Image (spheres, rainbow, N blue to C red):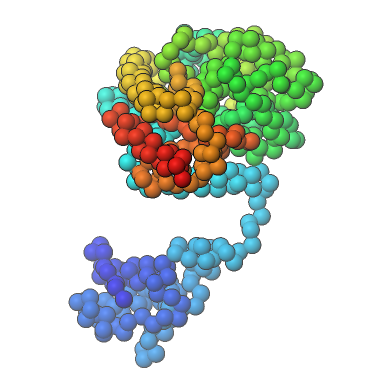
Amino acid sequence: MLIELDGHGPLYLQLYRAVKALILSGVLSEGQKLPPTRQLAKQLSVSRNVVMLGYDQLKAEGYVVGGFGSGTRVVELLPEDRVHGSIGREAKQTESFEPAPISEQAEIALGYWRERAKLNQDQHRSLRYDFRYGDIEVDTQSIKIWKQLSSRLFTKSVHQYADPQGDWLLRDKVAEHLNQLRGCHCSAGQIAIVNGSQQALDIIARLFIANSETVIVEEPGYQAARAVFQAAGAKIHSIAVDQDGMQTEKLPVRPGSARLAYVTPSHQFPTGAILSLARRLALLEWAAQSQAYIIEDDYDSEFRFEGRPISALQGLDYRGRTLYVGTFSKVLFPALRIGYVVLPPNLVEPFIALRWHADRHTNTHQQRVLAEFIAQGHYERHLRRMRKRYEGRRQRLITLLETHFGTALELQGTNAGLHLMVQFKDRILKTKEAEILKAASAAGLGIYPASPLYQTPPDRLGLLFGYGAIDESEIEPGILLLKQVIESFQQA
Ligand SMILES: Cc1ncc(COP(=O)(O)O)c(C=O)c1O
């Protein structure tokens, strides 16, 4: 048995820690004898007294029993087991437990969580070429400025509880940005700063859903939104998306038939379709007639590479039916966890009240840094730099997909955002989706299926390619590897 001391602190405590770790990880099992003190002292080149003190500590904490003559043994029931189950034994322990009595909502959330975990199980595998969607490029220039601002703004004024609606300066800057560049009509008073759009969706769900109300979502659509609504107790009504976005003519006509409609009109997730003006107007009319609200998730519209920027639905809405949700996760970085919502004036107070229950407010210091980053013009410069970089990758990815796959696949949603979607025409590939993903991963290629984003997946293989984090030089070898994988399944 290998007992290794970590070199920190008194020797007897080092020994105690080492033996305890072996017990908790199951290397030393219940009832097993520890080495005699004299023998272990010799093996570790320490005095016998050190070993005896270490064993005494383990005994005092209930990990071992015995001593003097009979030897020291690991107890049958560990202290951790008595309280909550031990580290190394987690799996063994939980098997024998009854399922925890959790709410129906938590059960739904757990289902989504486990599905996600299954999809991400290869996340820690070292991939040579990874087209993961959601990751972004970390810009060293902006990080340097961020650090300087961070240090300067870490003053006394950011240490107390603050306004749950968000820092006024940041709200003002966000309102200015949205009015000028996104065609919104809003004031700082209508904006609430949140910990990313995900928190906004959660609060909105609690604002409107109580008794199985219906929420309209896009098909395919953003799974994290669907999960929140469903876990809040909503009935989900999916409406198919085509090249002009959600097919609004399929919206339920009966007034009161739905409480909310969640849409991504500027760059539909995941297909990239842009909701046409006619459908935007139809959606707003439907919301007014049905007494429903629209959640407009404008998650990545800062990155538009072709065509004119499309004004937000919020700017077309004069009847106060739109809740516009935005995020800094794509333009800056997702770990920042700062997003915002533009609310119709009558919903500001209830939204803030619910938000206050969740976590009081978003980190004040980071809000100030962000407000200053925008106010000093760094945000605009950052955006211009990033657009250029992402545009290069987007072009490269499109060219390579077209060169190597030609008409074998259809490209979708290429003109904006940080991802695009492809659909292979060969139906055989769809039947082999799981094997293709596995083979790609084994070859060091990270590709991501579109199927989890559908309630009813189509009969063609769809893949999502994120180009936020992949280096431009890695795109070509990545696509060539994909070609090899796909061809091996076509020939098989
Ligand atoms: C459709 C959609 N909305 C919102 C987000 C951003 O979420 P958050 O602001 O919580 O990071 C993403 C991120 O991947 C997304 O795909």
* Residue at the outermost bottom position: 69
Q: Residue at x 59, y 16 (%)?
A: 244
* Residue at the outermost front position: 491
* Residue at the outermost right position: 254
* Above or below 57: residue 176: above
In front of the other: 182 or 487: 487
* Above or below 472: residue 117: below
Determine which quarter of the picture holds residue 376: top left
**Does any portion of residue 431 appear in the rendered image?**
yes
Q: Residue at x 58, y 30 (%)?
A: 221
In front of the other: 100 or 82: 100
In the picture, the quarter occupied by the N terminus is: bottom left
In front of the other: 143 or 453: 453
Q: Give the tally of numbered discs.
A: 0
Position of residue 277 measured from the top left corner of the image (x, y, whole percent)? 60, 10
Position of residue 262 measured from the top left corner of the image (x, y, whole percent)? 62, 25
Position of residue 38 measured from the top left corner of the image (x, y, whole percent)? 26, 85
Position of residue 255 measured from the top left corner of the image (x, y, whole percent)? 79, 20
Determine which quarter of the picture holds residue 234: top right
Q: Residue at x 42, y 35 (%)?
A: 132
**Does any portion of residue 143 appear in the rendered image?**
no
Q: In the picture provided, is 347 more to the left or to the right than 460?
A: right
In front of the other: 136 or 347: 136
Q: Residue at x 63, y 58 (%)?
A: 99
* Above or below 70: residue 318: above
